[in-house]
Image (spheres, rainbow, N blue to C red):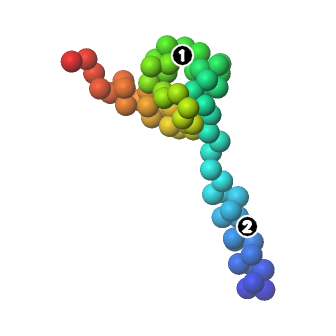
Amino acid sequence: MAKTKETVDTAEVKETAKPEPGFTKEQILASAKYANRRDLLTVLLDDGKSYTAEQVEQVMNDWFKKGVK
């Protein structure tokens, strides 16, 4: 029975360890989710690079925290 439990645990870990899908700059800019930040993201995101939703949020948060100089 120990082998069965280990197999189940391994399967559960594999399911939870799936990477988030990446999206291109163009896909992000075309999404309704970021429609109100399209101008900002056009400047902040790099062409040809993929981003997860978490990374996009982090890029925006970092920019907002910089402040005006």
Q: Residue at x 73, y 85 (%)?
A: 2
- Identify the residue at horizontal 66%, vertical 64% (top origin): 13
Numbered disc in front, either 1 or 2: 1
Q: Earlier in the sequence, mark 1 or mark 2?
A: 2
* Quadrant, the C terminus: top left
**In the rendered image, which quarter contains the N terminus?**
bottom right
Neighbour class for label 2 at 10 Å: few (<14), some, many (≥20)? few
On the picture, is 51 further left or further right than 31?
left
Q: Looking at the image, can residue 57 be seen?
A: yes
Q: CA distance from mark 1 to mark 2?
A: 39 Å
Q: Secondary structure at mark 2?
A: helix
Residue 25 drawn at (x, y percent):
57, 27
The relative height of residue 12 versus residue 32 in the rendered view (above or below) is below
> Looking at the picture, how far across and down is residue 60, in whole percent?
44, 27
Lateral position of residue 44 relative to residue 2, left or right: left
User: Residue shown at 62%/39% (left/top)?
Assistant: 22
Task: Determine contact: label 1, label 2, CB under 8 Å.
Answer: no
Q: Amino acid at mark 2?
A: Ala
Q: Residue at 48% of width from left, 29% of height from top?
A: 46
Q: Which residue is mark 1?
A: 38
Say which mark, if any, is on residue 14: none
Judge whether 36 appears above or below 17 on screen: above
Which amino acid is tagged 1?
Arg
Judging by the rendered image, the residue that carries numbered circle 2 is: 11
| Label 1 crowd bin: few (<14), some (14–19), many (20+), radius 10 Å | some
SS state under label 1: helix
* Viewer-proximal residue among 49 and 34: 49
- Where 17 falls versus 42 (above or below)? below
Give the quadrant of residue 51: top right
State left or right for residue 15 relative to residue 48.
right
